[in-house]
Amino acid sequence: MAIVTQSRKSAAVNPLKMSQPIGAALAFMGLRGCMPLLHGSQGCTSFGLVLFVRHFKEAIPMQTTAMSEVATVLGGFENVEQAVLNIVNRTKPEIIGIASTGVTETKGDDVEGFIRLIRQRHPEVKDFPLVYVSTPDFTGAFQDGWEKAVTNLVRELVRKPENAARKDMKAVNVLPGSHLTPGDIEELRTIIEDFGLEPTFLPDIGQSLDGHIPDDFTPTTIGGVGVEEVAAMGNAGWTIAVGAQMRAAAEAMQEKTGVPYRLFEKLCGLEAGDELIAFLTEISGRPAPTKYRRQRGQLIDAMLDGHFHIGGRKLAIGAEPDMLYDIGSLLHDMGAQIEAAVTTTQSPVLEKLETQEVVIGDLEDLETLAKERACDLLVTHAHGRQAAERLKIPFHRMGIPTFDRIGAAHEVSVGYRGARDLIFKIANLIIAHREANAHVTPDTWRNPWGELAGAEENGAAIATPVTH
């Protein structure tokens, strides 16, 4: 069992974590026709916007209430009101998701009261979906913002079923954590559908941020789950929650609709894949399709092949709690030793990680620990690249942001196939790093027989080389 400690530094030197508001904004982007609205200054939104554009390499919809110094002191009702009306009239969204920021949380704006007053003053938005979530960026992290947004979406949008006894047992709700990529969500969708089930994802960034090109430009999200689909989630037979961060949303769903849930704290690896397939077999009444039996065998073979390269490695990993637990557990199963683990916020899964200590800190803490403990593999997001270069160790990018490589949104780590491919990528990274630093080439490799071979051509006697 790991001991969770907090870094005692006065400031983050090289931040690992991202703020709650952009975690909530990403969750809102999983709804079709949504416009995320950050209640704060323009800078709060612009930095988050740039981060998402660099990671996903796509146009990102996001608006701001553009709070000035005066508005911050006097209160932001007029800014929220004007922003909501402008967005409704100009961009025609299906829903607006509002997230607070540090500046408005410090002032103490009553945004829920603002929304009630806006509805009273403007009948055209009386029934328009406006979902607010309190996400101060001076506390918590990206994962916390996502968790709060999804929980509030369940509370605000999901309808209580008229007849709780009549459930559609083929319908399955899926509440994915923020550590899942659009590629992960699409893989999970395929797995569930192969059992004859009909999944509804909330949020569904697999449909909105998967990089597809729309027929026409739209200023809002170009895919995702619709508001009416979310409203109907109370009729499902089961809810699948992925990551400990989704427990609150799953409990809110069960409390409101009576739909039972199953929480999967991880989906990467052999044991995690077995648990998912067994559960889907149970609730669908169907045996596992043959292709998953074959994929399971491929994963076992990949583990056998990969452990020669990953086994014994001293791992330094920095990520949000659920990703840290998911990916760290897989690499531990592959024989790696988790010597340095740094995360962003508290979570019950941290104590379950197979290491002595998990530090809530930044990338400087991760680099310091990795150096002290002679780690030879680093896993974190793209901001860890300088640390890996200084440490001269192989570096695998995972998580948001990954801005110096393309295709980050399509990376897959869930299920048998995702775990198999992740093992291959990390093992090949280690092999390539070893070869790059070995300096053994046809030009640099010394043939102990070379000089003697030349002597033989001249007719000289050949003696057996002496080794010591």
Image: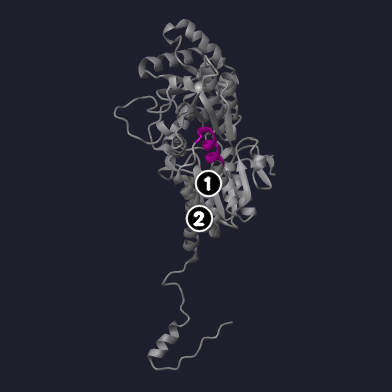
- Seen from the viewer's position, the closer of residues 160 and 155 is 160
Looking at this view, is 285 or 342 the one in front? 285
Label the magenta part by its dominant secondary structure: helix
Residue 375 within the magenta-colored segment of the rendering? no
Q: Residue at x 64, y 54 (%)?
A: 373
Secondary structure of the residue carrying numbered label 1 = helix
Amino acid type of the residue that numbered disc 2 sits on in the rendered structure: Asp
Q: CA distance from mark 1 to mark 2?
A: 30 Å
x and y, in percent, of residue 410 in the image: 42, 41
The image's mark for residue 301 is 2
Q: Tag 2's secondary structure?
A: helix
Q: Which mark is residue 384?
A: 1
Whether residue 281 appears in magenta in the rendering, the answer is: yes
Earlier residue among tags 1 and 2: 2
Query: In which image quadrant can residue 88 be found?
Result: top left
Tally of numbered discs? 2
User: Quick one: quadrant of the N terminus?
Assistant: top right
The spot of residue 431 in percent (x, y) is 49, 59
Bounds of the magenta segment:
275-285
User: Any mark on residue 269, and which?
Assistant: none
The quadrant of the image that shows the C terminus is bottom right
Q: Is residue 454 above or below residue 294?
A: below
What's the residue at 44%, 33% (across, down)? 196
Between 428 and 7, the one nearer to me in the picture? 428
Nearer the viewer's eye, disc 1 or disc 2?
A: 2
